[in-house]
Amino acid sequence: MEVPIQKITMKRLKMRLKTPFATSFGTMRHKEFFLLAASDGEGNTGYGESAAFTEPWYTEETVETTRHMLEDFLIPILGENKVSHPDEVSELFRPIRRNNMAKASVEGAVWDLYAKRKGIPLAEALGGKKQKIDVGVSLGIQPTVKDTLEVMEQYLEEGYKRIKLKIKPGWDIDVLREVRRRFPEAPIMADANSAYTLEDIDHLKQLDDLDLLMIEQPLGADDIIDHAKLQRVIQTPVCLDESITSLEDVKKARESGSCQVINIKISRVGGLTEARKIHDFCQRQGIRVWCGGMLEAGVGRAHNIALTTLPQFLLPGDTSGSSRYWEKDIIKPEVVVTDGEISVLDRPGIGYELDEEAVRRFTIEEKVFEL
Ligand SMILES: O=C(O)CCC(=O)C1=CC=C[C@@H](O)[C@@H]1C(=O)O
Ligand SMILES: [Mg+2]
């Protein structure tokens, strides 16, 4: 079955986060991204959302590099080639090095279009079976420990199944100790976004007294080797985030013993096809995975939900409800979390409709590509 792509509309949106998101490398107040709509000319439209931030501090990509890649390379490639299954998109994009977040945004729109043409949910098209997924929440660094405890209490009361706390040198062991004292049983993990080096090994060993689910990306953003050295001397499971950009990276991490857990982000690995390959490999190898987030708006969030229905997503991910990020999301209905779970919609494609009024309100630029 062909997936004819007649037109791609690319809207640039800017949305204000309800609360600023602070990490070891900076504070975000807005999310700017591209909303991609791929139409088949037969009444079906698939949606994708770009993930890169305006600044290159999480990966090297930005909103501007995404625009350049989409306009000048990726959309033209789709115009020149026929696609019969979305798995072919990442193959077509292979000659373009990296730029995974740009690739994932348009590949996601093709996956949604494919599922809608088949009349099945995106989750089913990917092979997912879960009707509900467990979710957690990722907390930015708060101004004080007291704030941290209050915000955590609120999310635990809302039922989120695990809390991820951002840490950095000077805001780590002592804060986590306070948190553990206040919530002795809570499922807690920490994410350092590469803020440490092997020189901090003795400091990081203190994490072992805190009963954390895992420590996410403590060392270099593209490192596999140092994490293996760290994992050998700490009991706390290491989870890799930034270091994993492909299945190849996962295989190297596995061989080196760099981690026990993988955070799969669709955008960071270049799309749903690669994300599913990583999932399948981890399932065969018994490596636990969970779905990471990029503070996505509704469309990206819907893609994360669909991916999380695959069986090896054994740990709650970062896909929280719309209201945790936005006053108003761009989808109808919004994503709702009840008792730490999101129900997967049984409708074709991503399952959610665009809230056209909200999309219009947040759009700052628009381009149309006839293919
Ligand atoms: O709620 C989410 O979407 C997850 C947010 C989150 O933790 C992150 C998003 C983007 C970059 C990082 O700061 C961080 C992460 O490393 O996972
Ligand atoms: Mg992370």
Image (cartoon, rainbow, N blue to C red):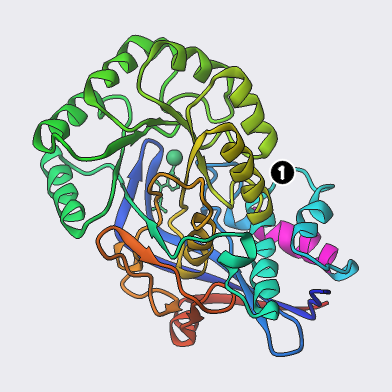
Q: Is residue 62 above or below residue 86?
A: above
Question: Majority secondary structure of the magenta segment?
Answer: helix
Of residues 64 and 330, the one nearer the viewer is 330
Over which residues does the magenta segment extend? 65-78
The residue at the far bottom in this view is 43
Q: Residue at horizontal 33%, vertical 17%? A: 204
Of residues 16 and 308, the one nearer the viewer is 308
Magenta highlight on residue 66: yes
Residue 18 coordinates in the image, percent (x, y): 29, 64
Disc 1, SS? loop
Of residues 217 and 286, the one nearer the viewer is 286
| Residue ID for mark 1 | 98
Q: Is residue 99 left or right of residue 95?
A: left
Packing grade of label 1 (10 A; few <14, some 14-19, many >=20) is some
**Number of residue marks:** 1
Q: Looking at the rendering, which quadrant does residue 124 occupy?
A: bottom right
Residue 254 coordinates in the image, percent (x, y): 59, 25
